[in-house]
Amino acid sequence: QVQLVESGGGLVQAGGSLRLSCAASGTIFSINEMGWYRQAPGKQREVVAAVISGGKRNYSDSVKGRFTISRDNAKNTVYLQMNSLKPEDSAVYYCNAEARIDDYGSTWHGWGQGTRVTVSS
């Protein structure tokens, strides 16, 4: 089984920065994709950024130019550097990953427990 553990959330003033981390552990042969989603109160969960095994990165339009996703393959960890934060970025941020877990190509897909980000105006 695979576990995802997030860290790095907190309270920050508008214009500030935070860095989120998500470490995957367990029986992992390789990770196909890791990404970040967020869910604000009363809203649906939405994708923020993702990085696939080839290194390609995708961002939602709302965070392009402000957020940067990166990945340390040796540590099975993904980071989200968030700069120029806005109050509308306030949400619970969830890590998401798809991992290959055996030699037969079986995959695991799941979520972390979430970390709260609050941006004050």
Image (cartoon, grey):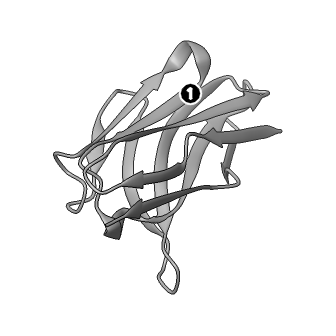
Quarter of the rendering occupied by the N terminus? top right
Spot occupied by residue 111 in the image (x, y as percentages of width and height): 66, 53
Tell me which residue sits at (29%, 53%) in the image: 85
97 horizontally vs 18: left or right: right
- Most extreme residue toward the top is 74
Instruction: Please count the marks in the image.
Output: 1
Judge by depth and name the residue closer to the eye, 98 or 92.
92
Above or below — where is 74 with respect to 41?
Answer: above
Spot occupied by residue 50 in the image (x, y as percentages of width and height): 39, 45
Spot occupied by residue 33 in the image (x, y as percentages of width and height): 49, 39
Quarter of the rendering occupied by the C terminus? bottom left
Tell me which residue sits at (57%, 49%) in the image: 96
Tell me which residue sits at (64%, 55%) in the image: 114
Judge by depth and name the residue closer to the eye, 54 or 96.
96
Above or below — where is 74 with respect to 119?
Answer: above
92 horizontally vs 57: left or right: right
Q: Which residue is mark 1?
A: 77
Above or below — where is 7 with respect to 55?
Answer: below
82 horizontally vs 1: left or right: left
- Most extreme residue toward the left is 65
Displayed quadrant of residue 105 = top right
Judge by depth and name the residue closer to the eye, 4 or 33.
4
The secondary structure type at the circle numbered 1 is strand
